[in-house]
Image (cartoon, rainbow, N blue to C red):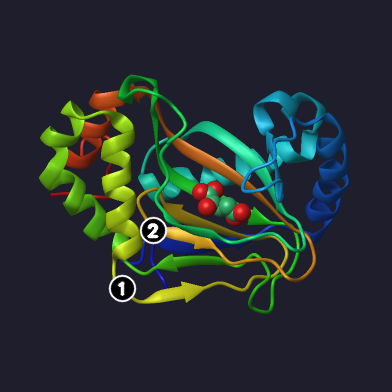
Amino acid sequence: MSTFIGDGFCFGDVVSSDLLLQLKNEVLVACQLGDERGREGEVDRLFELTLLQQKLPHTFLLSEIANNFASKLIGREAELIMSQLVVRKSGSMGVPFHVDGRPTVKTWNEMPFCQVIVGVPLTEVNTRQSGNLIYKQGAHLTVCNFIKKNITRFLEMDKDVAFREVYDFVRNLDMPQLALNWSPGQMYAMHALLPHGVEENQNAERPVWYFRFGNPMHKGATGFNSAFKGIDWPIILD
Ligand SMILES: O=C(O)CCC(=O)C(=O)O
């Protein structure tokens, strides 16, 4: 059985089938209203909840359920930084191992730090090569130690260069890996520093709502530094 602290991953409650049905209906609306952005060769769709939540009441309810789950894990009221519906189309490529930050922002100061990611799959995944989430068990602690050791140097570097170093470290980490299957509505949480990726999808479209929680006030170097000292990051302590 995985645990959030030891593994960097854990399952939570299963969302009720009534709610799941409503959520699936809202996905269709989200797909019409959302900001569709192709990534990795136009193979997936990504919709930012913040733009949509007024129009999607059940999705908003889901974000509150995810918030309760994240709050229990971090031991205080979790704050939603960002959320997305990620639909991996049939035929989509996989995503290599990475940790979560915002590699697209230009400087450390633009970077809100995400601490916990909650995922809610809307469909079943019961076989490999179906857009399964993969992760390296317990590797968030190794990544944390690597960043702690290099923090001063990283903060003085160009952000992209520092991130590349972290990403290279993450990809080359030789640690046990797990690929997940799930039932519809099976909520899960990952530590933001847990190396994870996604398998290619040769099967049905695979939608997952993601909710990212953290401290929006802890931007850039402040967030980075305090996070890894365990201040406001109760999951990892020295
Ligand atoms: O499940 C997905 O398709 C993407 C998950 C992921 O790697 C992420 O959101 O960081």
Residues under numbered marks 1 and 2 in contact, where contact means CB atoms less than 8 Å apart: yes
Kind of residue at disc 1: Met
Q: Residues within 10 Å of mark 2 (few under 14, many from 20)?
A: many
Q: Classify residue 109 as left or right of residue 64.
A: left
Picture coordinates of residue 210 (x, y %)? 60, 46
Q: Is residue 55 above or below residue 194?
A: above
Q: Classify residue 20 as left or right of residue 168.
A: right
Q: What number is the disc on residue 195? A: 2
Front in this rendered view, residue 124 or 154: 154
CB at disc 1 and ligand 1 closer than 8 Å: no
Q: What number is the disc on residue 175? A: 1
Q: Quadrant of residue 16 in the image?
A: bottom right
Picture coordinates of residue 120 (x, y %)? 64, 54
Q: Is residue 146 above or below residue 130?
A: above
Q: Residues within 10 Å of mark 1 (few under 14, many from 20)?
A: few
Picture coordinates of residue 8 (x, y %)? 37, 60
